[in-house]
Amino acid sequence: MTDIQAIATPTGSVPAELVDFVVHEARLADENRYAEWESLWADDGIYWIPTGDHKDPQTQVSFVFDNRHRIGSRIAQLLSGRRHSQTPPSKMRRQLTNFEVLSDEGGEVELAANFSLFEHRYTTTVWAGRYLYRLRHTADGLSLVKKTVLLINNESAIKTIAFIL
């Protein structure tokens, strides 16, 4: 068996290590394995879900704009069993496609991927958009520095985001 080194895309190739990392990150979120998901984050991590086409989360409203401490708080709530908006927890599966390396410099890589997420909790909801990741190479492997979730309906009212997109 040959090890796959890169995934061919219409815009070039994407190192398999990067695709493997974000697919693993998605699987952990899908399976509500939040403690493991949290361990992927760098100490200076940012998780951002902007509204509209906003470019500056410091001055404009966001659905979510979490620093590393707030990511930890969000995970603690989800793991507490007292997050009533997730009792019972959502069942989720997401698909990632159209991977693109946007930049690779200074030990950090910016990667983009389209996604569709199927969430079921009493009814089924489809979430779709584009993920923008900033990944950092460390001695221990890759870590997640920033994840931006660009929802296709981010200019509309949306259901409560009570889980990890």
Image: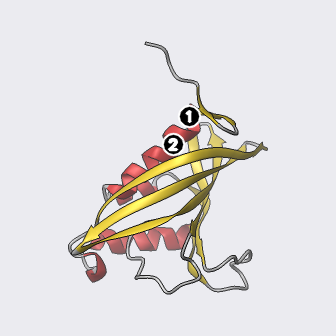
Quarter where residue 75 is shown: bottom left
Q: Is residue 145 visible?
A: yes
Q: Nearer the viewer, residue 157 or 27?
A: 157
Residue 21, horizontal then vertical, whole percent: 51, 42
Tell me the quarter of the image containing the N terminus. Answer: top left
Q: Which residue is mark 1?
A: 17
Residue 99, horizontal then vertical, whole percent: 60, 45
Q: How dense is the environment of label 2, judged by Cα within 10 Å: few (below 14), some, or many (20 and up)?
A: some
Q: Regarding mark 1 in the picture, which secondary structure is present there?
A: helix
Q: Nearer the viewer, residue 109 or 11?
A: 11
Residue 23, horizontal then vertical, whole percent: 46, 45
| Mark 1 and mark 2 residues within 8 Å of each other at the beta carbon | yes
Question: Who's the residue at 42% across and 55% down the image?
Answer: 37
Q: Regarding mark 2 in the picture, which secondary structure is present there?
A: helix
Q: Is residue 36 visible?
A: no
Above or below for 165 versus 63: above
Task: Report, in whole angstroms, how far the alpha carbon at label 1 lies from the one at label 2.
Answer: 6 Å
Quarter where residue 118 is shown: bottom left
Q: How dense is the environment of label 1, judged by Cα within 10 Å: few (below 14), some, or many (20 and up)?
A: some
Say which mark, if any, is on residue 21: 2
Residue 78, horizontal then vertical, whole percent: 33, 71
Q: How is the image coloured?
A: secondary structure
The amino acid sitting under disc 2 is: Phe
Tell me the quarter of the image containing the C terminus. Answer: bottom left
Number of marks in the image?
2
List the single residue furthest toward the right.
105
Question: Who's the residue at 22% across and 76% down the image?
Answer: 87
The amino acid sitting under disc 1 is: Glu
